[in-house]
Amino acid sequence: MLKLFGICVIFGGILGGIVSWNEDRRRKICDMVLVEQFVSHAVYRLETEKVYVAELLEVTGAKSDRLRGTFRDIVAKMQKNDCPYGEQIWTEGWRKHRTEWNFSEQFLILVIECQKGLFGDNLRENIDILKHIREQMQIQIQEEKAQWREKQKVVTPVGILGGIMIVIILL
């Protein structure tokens, strides 16, 4: 009886790990989409009206608590005038919060590259840079979704078989 209980605990742990992995992957994709939406919003606002970066960050950060926290730190540093360069503040802010976001290194580089489009001198170039970054982000998101779907094809049957094995063992 104790062996059966131990086997069930092991299978339950494996299934729990699979579910946890799946949720982390889904959350990562949602975070990537959230940042890509910020870039899209920035492009739109810069094209339609001249807006300051601090205002853009405060308005856009309302979608997510983590995004709001990251943007709040960046805006606070900008308002303190700790550093005369917004690009440096942007880079430091994202590097500081990188553990919260769980982005791939390539996507994090794209997020940091947004500073060129947000703090540049020429408005037309800024918009073009942000559009290019947005396209690259969309490609990264599509690749991440494709990888997730491929792994789902393996994870789902393993989870189902694991559940069936637990039921068989308990009977």
Image (tube, rainbow, N blue to C red):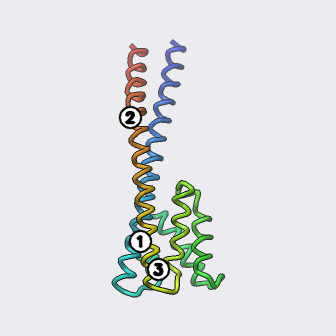
Q: Name the residue nearer the viewer: 96 or 171.
A: 96
Q: Looking at the image, which residue is at 58% across and 57% down? A: 99
Q: Position of residue 72 (x, y in %)?
A: 52, 73
Q: Nearer the viewer, mark 3 or mark 2?
A: 3
Neighbour tally class for label 2: few under 14, some 14-19, many 20 plus, Cα within 10 Å: few
Determine the secondary structure under disc 1. helix
Give the percent coordinates (x, y) of residue 138: 40, 60
The span from disc 3 to disc 1 (Cα, nearest Å) is 9 Å
Residue beneath disc 2 = 153
Which residue is at the far right?
82
Q: What residue do we see at 46% from left, 31% from top?
A: 15
Q: Are marks 3 and 2 in contact (CB under 8 Å)?
A: no
In this rendering, is residue 10 above or below 145?
above
Quarter-of-image position of residue 165? top left
Residue 126's label in the rendered image is 3
Report the label total.
Answer: 3
Query: Who's the residue at 38% across and 28% down the image?
Result: 157
As displayed, is residue 41 above or below residue 81? Answer: above
Numbered circle sitting on residue 59: none
Residue 2 in picture, x, y percent from top left? 54, 14
Residue 56 x, y percent position in the rendering: 43, 79
Q: Mark 1 highlights which residue?
A: 131
Say what amino acid the circle numbered 3 marks: Asn
Nearest to N terminus: mark 3 or mark 1: 3
Image quarter in which the C terminus is found: top left
Tell me the distance, in whole angstroms, between the alpha carbons under discs 1 and 2: 33 Å
> Quick one: label 1 or label 2, which is nearer the N terminus?
1
Instruction: Answer few, some or many: residues within 10 Å of disc 1's Cα (few below 14, many 20 plus, some between 14 and 19).
Output: some
- Say left or right for 92 vs 133: right
Q: Residues within 10 Å of mark 3 (few under 14, many from 20)?
A: many
